[in-house]
Image (tube, helix red, strand yellow):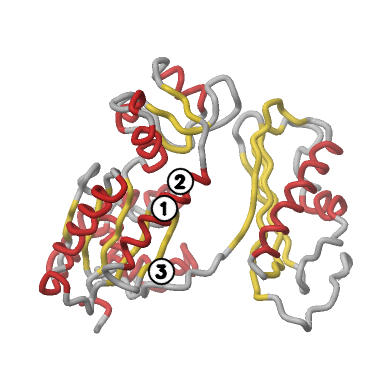
Amino acid sequence: MPAQLRKIIHIDMDAFFAAVEQRNNPKYRNKPIIVGGAPDSRGVVATCSYEARKYGIHSAMPSSRAFSLCPQAIFVKPRIVLYKEVSALIRQIFYQYTKLVEPVSLDEAYLDVSQSELYQGSATRIALAIKQQILSDTGLVASAGVSYNKFFAKIASDMDKPDGLYLITPEQGVEFVAQLPIGKFHGVGKATERKMHDLGIKNGADLKQFSLPTLQQHFGKSAAFFFNIAQGIDARPIRVDRESKSIGTETTYSADLLQSNEIYQQLTELFSKALAKVYAKKLYARTLTIKVKYHDFQQITRSLTFNKPIKSQLVTTPVFRQLLRKDDIGQSKVRLLGITLSTLEKQTNYYQQMDIFD
């Protein structure tokens, strides 16, 4: 079936972590619930209930800021194991309707129902049935977007939250994207939005005025995606076996770090944890990325790609010093550190031990 005629559903659980906590604890229902760090900690909001969102609270906001906006909010420590269990139950519901399921995270997934004969092949009715079964089986509410490609299905699922069900047909696609603010485009972050605005691109109609070569000059590999989306085209398939593109871990510290030796020690510990995750998936990585967030929330990332797989014998501190040699390590206080490993490859027997000097 041609990409533009597919039937794609995007399911997005509403305030998932908070909703699970409210379901499991009746005292939390209809109350502003914040799942994340404690209000007197350096933590951030993972997610929050819709009752909390009325106060302007959102994910990634510092917990202390969330508390100042809503002092009566109930702060709950995340229970990731529980959320994974509930997510697994929801995914089993998806597989009752189609085998073409692409999980994106614990609380969202794409489904391709193009070939389904359920409900006379109506993707909208299938989406409604999935929403109803999720509510019946788990007590949780989901929003669904239905369209002819992944981009519009994702946008549609966010149109009428919570408990939404929104359809964007092939006939509506081009007109819909024309009036869509560029900041609402899935895949356009704050930095890209600012760059678009600098070029005079405020919505899809503006974007459509730019040729592919011109967009490539400004946005590189992402240009083709932006060019096609402006025409209402997104040929990305549902990826049933979704492979990890990167694996990492990060920590926000209760007290700022200043001493360089302590920072490098913490980075080494994070590196070991990230590498263990990579090995657990029977993968190797060749790119190491360091993330540093300073006390004033300024953030940097520094990366280095090796020509052989990264092994546990890597002498980390010289690498960290090399990557961060131009930054203020030991001069400015650090609140968060992270390590990400990418350029992932499946483990094979022919890899040789990596030398730090390669």
Tell how many labels.
3
Whether pointer 3 and pointer 2 mark residues with C-beta atoms closer than 8 Å, the reply is no
Q: Which of the image's four quarters has the N terminus?
A: bottom left
Q: Residues within 10 Å of mark 1 (few under 14, many from 20)?
A: many
Instruction: Name the residue tied to disc 2.
Output: 83
Instruction: Name the residue tied to disc 3.
Output: 214
Instruction: Name the residue tied to disc 1.
Output: 87
Local secondary structure at mark 3:
helix
Q: Is residue 202 left or right of residue 199?
A: left
- Name the residue located 27 percent from the left edge and 52 percent from the top edge: 134
- Name the residue located 51 percent from the left edge and 39 percent from the top edge: 79
Q: Which of the image's four quarters has the C terminus?
A: bottom right
Between tags 3 and 2, which lies in front?
2
Whether pointer 1 and pointer 2 mark residues with C-beta atoms closer than 8 Å, the reply is yes
Q: Name which residue type carries label 3.
A: Thr
Q: Is residue 79 left or right of residue 209?
A: right
Labels 3 and 1: the sequence-earlier one: 1
Instruction: Kindly report the distance in space between the C-alpha atoms of the residues bearing marks 3 and 2.
Output: 44 Å
* Front residue of 190 and 284: 284
Q: Position of residue 245 (x, y in %)?
A: 56, 65
- Name the residue located 79 percent from the left edge and 39 percent from the top edge: 263
